[in-house]
Image (cartoon, helix red, strand yellow):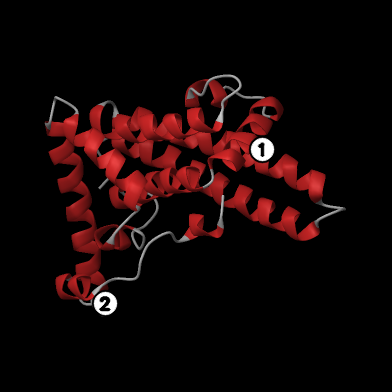
Amino acid sequence: MPEQFSRPVRRPSSAFDNIVSAHDPAEETRIAHATASALLTRVRADESGVSADRLVAFTAEHGIDEIAELWSKAPARTLPGALWRLYLLQLAIHTDPHTAALLYERGRVELASVDAIVAGAPVPASPDEIVALIDTILRGAFRGDFAVALDRAASFCRVHASGATHTADDYELTEPSRASELTTRALRLSSYAQDLTAAATLWRTDALV
């Protein structure tokens, strides 16, 4: 995954500045939670699934815009924080599906857990299949059980992190800078996995806000 993985959004535009002042953190927090809740509620209300499909397709093509910039500032274990991480994963996989598939397959082989089964990728998974998987997980967040989607995303992160860690070991002696990049990626993904798992637990107890 490229460096965009950590911050793949545009700077807030003038329109965004008109929505909320950058000097009002309390208002930013309020709007972040309100927009996340409104989006999830509206898309899930469409039983046809058309809204969810359009949303997934739009974010895959255009990334995350100014409203999601608010979500990036929300605590990790909140609704906007969880949505932010789901979108980051989608954007990162779409940006570099070949690397994502290689790291996922390496992680699947190395990781002694059920995470690969929970994530649900084919064995082995091609780049296109990895892209389809992350889109399916995101679509499931809006059409199915939100907690299950978060758990699948967390498992995806753990498998991917394992792959990045073991691949980093391969590069440690010959390409230390590449090894460092992969190690950083693995740590980030592991952190996301913990946050998404915690968010799933909170959702199941109606405590994810």
Up the image or down, 68 lies above or below 93; here it is: below
Residue 202 on image: x %, y %: 33, 39
Query: Mark 1 Cα within 10 Å, few/some/many (few <14, many 20+)?
Result: many
Q: Residue at x 44, y 29 (%)?
A: 133
Residue 134 on image: x %, y %: 43, 34
How many marks on residues?
Answer: 2
User: Dot 2 lies on which element?
Assistant: loop
Res 74 → quadrant: bottom left
Report the residue that reaches farthest toward the bottom. Answer: 23
Which of the two discs, 2 and 1, labels the residue nearer the N terminus?
2
Residue 49 on image: x %, y %: 19, 28
Which residue is more in the foreground, 114 or 2?
A: 2
Residue flagged by tag 2: what amino acid is it? Ala
Q: Residue at x 18, y 31 (%)?
A: 50
Query: Mark 2 Cα within 10 Å, few/some/many (few <14, many 20+)?
Result: few
Q: Is residue 23 left or right of residue 10?
A: left
Residue flagged by tag 1: what amino acid is it? Gly
Q: Is residue 132 left or right of residue 144?
A: right
Residue 40 visible in the snapshot: yes
Residue at the disc numbered 1: 163
Residue 33 on image: x %, y %: 22, 55
Residue at the disc numbered 2: 22
Res 196 → quadrant: top left
Residue 207 visible in the snapshot: no
User: Dot 1 lies on which element?
Assistant: helix
Which residue is more in the foreground, 73 or 198?
A: 73
Q: Residue at x 43, y 30 (%)?
A: 132
Which residue is more in the foreground, 199 or 118?
A: 118
Residue mark closest to the camera, 2 vs 1: 1
Q: Residue at x 14, y 25 (%)?
A: 48
